[in-house]
Amino acid sequence: MTVGRSKITPYKQLDLRDLFFDQMRSVGAVFKKYEGKDWLEKAYYLFDITAGDMGLDKKTSPRIFLSKLLENEGFNFKVFLIEKNKTTFSELKKNVMNFIKEIPLIDERRYFRENVNCILGNNNKVLVRPEYLNGKHKWKYGLVYFDPNGFSYETWDLLSDFLGRWKALDVIMNLSAAANKRCINNPKTLMHQGKRISHFIDMIPKSKKFIRDCYSGDQHQFFMLFCTNWADYRICRNYDFIDLDTYEGQQILERLDQTKEEKCR
Ligand SMILES: C[S@@+](CC[C@H](N)C(=O)[O-])C[C@H]1O[C@@H](n2cnc3c(N)ncnc32)[C@H](O)[C@@H]1O
């Protein structure tokens, strides 16, 4: 059984696949254009920081990422699959090993079992060591995928710090607006303190943000975000991602921010 499934999942996975293929093509074009430059590490970095178990479903996020990366010969990559649940992590590891068994290994791969908080937040870990992002090859391209089964508030400060340091990493998020709304007026969620989705989106240190509204009929109101520092990034309109700097984008955000009671006022 794959973790975190709902009736919207197949749509979400298609959006993820299309977006990822698009983004990877753009990174490939950068690698070609700047081939041989000192500042560039010609390896695609992929962080699936809430990876799940990879399940039997062909469209789980680690499968989407790994199959595409593996089929692109000559494209070096480094994959970090992070999953906090011990049982889910051991399933993930087993499934990944089965999946890549027949395919020759191209490059280094690492699996982390720890909670994403200690991966991103512990200074002894390679991902946040300053020298990793300063010396030769300091420009590292790739993608972070954050799909926490709701909202996962405790992760945001660290995620924001990490994405700020890794300037050329783009990020895709799949978040539930309904989960956030439930916390807005709930005194038990002390960490949250009534914060809206727009507050969390502001914390993402990327200059361009695109939003895909939730699908109608989805009680969890899962929406997707794609954020990047590429000023002229062109996202394919076919999959309904709207620039948050536009009126239409702001309208979507407003709807996702407001509770049912506020909408009725
Ligand atoms: C919705 S599922 C991921 C599904 C997966 N992306 C897919 O496409 O099949 C969310 C997963 O994130 C894990 N998770 C939630 N918070 C986490 C954290 N702070 N660090 C690492 N993993 C986390 C959960 O244990 C769960 O397995």
Image (cartoon, rainbow, N blue to C red):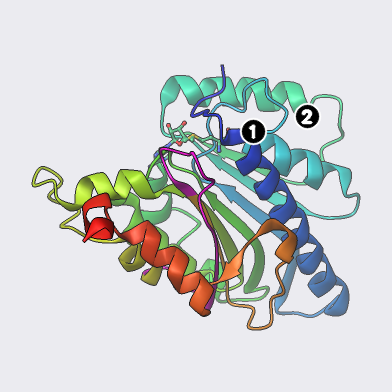
Taking depth in this image into account, of 107 and 1 the one nearest to the observer is 1
Q: Earlier in the sequence, mark 2 or mark 1?
A: 1
Q: Amino acid at mark 1?
A: Thr
Which element is circle 1 on?
A: loop
Magenta region = 203-222
Residue 100 at what x, y percent from top left?
78, 29
Q: Residue drawn at (37%, 71%), measured in percent from left and top?
A: 202
What secondary structure is found at the residue carrying circle 2? helix
Q: Main secondary structure of the magenta part?
A: loop
Location of the C terminus by quadrant is bottom left
Q: Point out residue 38 in the picture as x, y percentages from the top left corner.
A: 75, 79
Q: How far across and down, in percent of the image, does residue 84 sit?
A: 41, 34
Q: Identify the residue at the far left of this view.
A: 187
Residue contact between numbered discs 2 and 1, judged by CB atoms under 8 Å: no
Q: Which mark is residue 15?
A: none
Check the image and name the residue furthest to the right.
73
Point out the frontmost of discs 2 and 1.
1
Q: Residue under circle 2?
A: 100
Q: Residue at x 68, y 50 (%)?
A: 78
Please indicate whether residue 42 sits to the left or right of residue 124 in the image: right
- Pick the residue in front: 114 or 192: 192
